[in-house]
Image (cartoon, rainbow, N blue to C red):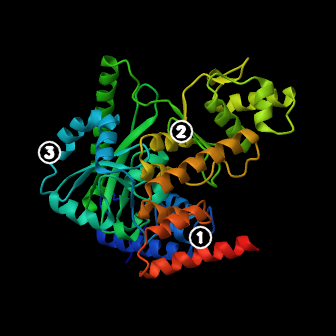
Amino acid sequence: MQSQPPTGGNPWVAVRPGDDVAMLARRVSSAHQLFVERRAPAGRAPDGEGNSVRSVILDSWVRSTSKGVNPDGSARAVDLAAADLAAYRASHPMSIIRPVVRKLLVEDAADTGLLIAITDEKGQLLWVEGDSSAKDRALEMNFVEGADWSEDTVGTNAPGTALALDHCVQIFGAEHFSRSVHDWSCSAAPVHDPATGLIVGAIDITGGPRVAVPEVLSLIRATVAAAEAELRLHQLRSPHPLVETVLRLEVLGSGRPTLIRGGERIPLSQRHAEILLLLAEHPEGLSSDRLAVLLDENELDAVTIRAEMSRLRKVFGPVNLGSRPYRLLAELTSDVRQVRGALDRGELAAALDVYSGPVLPGSEAPGVEDLRDELRARVQAALLREGDQRLLAKWTTSVHGREDVAAWEAYLAGLDPRSPLYSQVKSRIDLFDQQYAT
């Protein structure tokens, strides 16, 4: 006889009193297999699946599928060096509450098979502490400090789903979207900035099936309450906000231009991205006529510029844009500035990590075209100057560098003429010569 899925009750609790854990595990595992193999159309589950798992889990599975998460994949490491991760953790608001978490959860976790994790607001694991043998086992699923456990990356999991839903949640065994996590259960809840209500991270307990019972969810919620009280005390002692509100513009590569504000990603139209980028390049401000010239070689009229700026204020914030001349009144950083900063410091590898493609590749605005050419020329010049074979290989196989003849020639110059790779690179250069000759 199979146990029936629960109806009513707390949807955030995974294992209820009286549940047959072994039978529940079999039922959830079967439902997961059916879901993954049958691959429901976007927005709904295969027929019958809604009767097998909690709605909060089913909805998360559907989101995971729509995001293209691989159920046989695993968490990915965020590209941060150990020193950078340490600096990031030290400056993050969650570092303020770590002593509270250690006192309430970590100190008693030794030899219990439990792991206590603290994440940032995006789902990156900042600290993973607890039972040493459990930490060793968790390496197999990359549940380690620095790894990205957001729902968009790993699919259904307690910290990632808690952040996605802004609610405490438990995940039991095969309720996880990724098969590599099916031997684990977890309970997590988001932590908020008491002043703004913004999510600053999450607290998670990971272990065996007993982690998915109501008492553990209550423990997590109590720990979060204590943590947020600690943040409130910290704010009384410090004038600085927990969450920085610096705006960030992302315009590199083929993706849609995006404005990041307080952890929120806001898609931008190309025109709005062009205007913000140009204003960031001219902190002194731009007159309506000058902005029109930089946006369109045929020059836009003043009425069109005013209309665009009016629409942009609704997205960017009316207090963040000035007029007469048009200028930024709030700090706006960008991936373009980040690449330039890395180049200025001589950190070419870091610059290439951020330089995912040209500046607004679809834009024909004269001011943007100049910026695009300038940044690409700086990256290319740095590559040729350093002659790093690894970075040249990365560049010449990228979309924006695969037809860069000068880079291919620099790459060839550093190769052993007897190596097979030398022949391949030489053939590519010969092909360029033939193409240009015609």
Label tally: 3
> Which numbered circle lies on residue 196?
none
Which amino acid type is marked by label 2? Arg
Does 360 sit above or below residue 92?
below
Residue 337, label in figure: 2
Q: Which residue is mark 3?
A: 107
Q: Which comes before the other along the chain, label 2 or label 1?
A: 1
Question: In x, y percent, where is residue 357?
Answer: 59, 54
Labelled disc at residue 40: 1
Q: Position of residue 393 (x, y in %)?
A: 48, 66
Disc 2 packing (10 Å; few <14; some 14–19; many ≥20)? some
- Quarter of the image where the C terminus is located: bottom right
- Is residue 151 in sight in this rendering? yes
**Neighbour tally class for label 3: few under 14, some 14-19, many 20 plus, Cα within 10 Å:** few
**Distance between the Cα atoms at labels 3 and 1?**
43 Å
Q: Residue at x 65, y 42 (%)?
A: 371
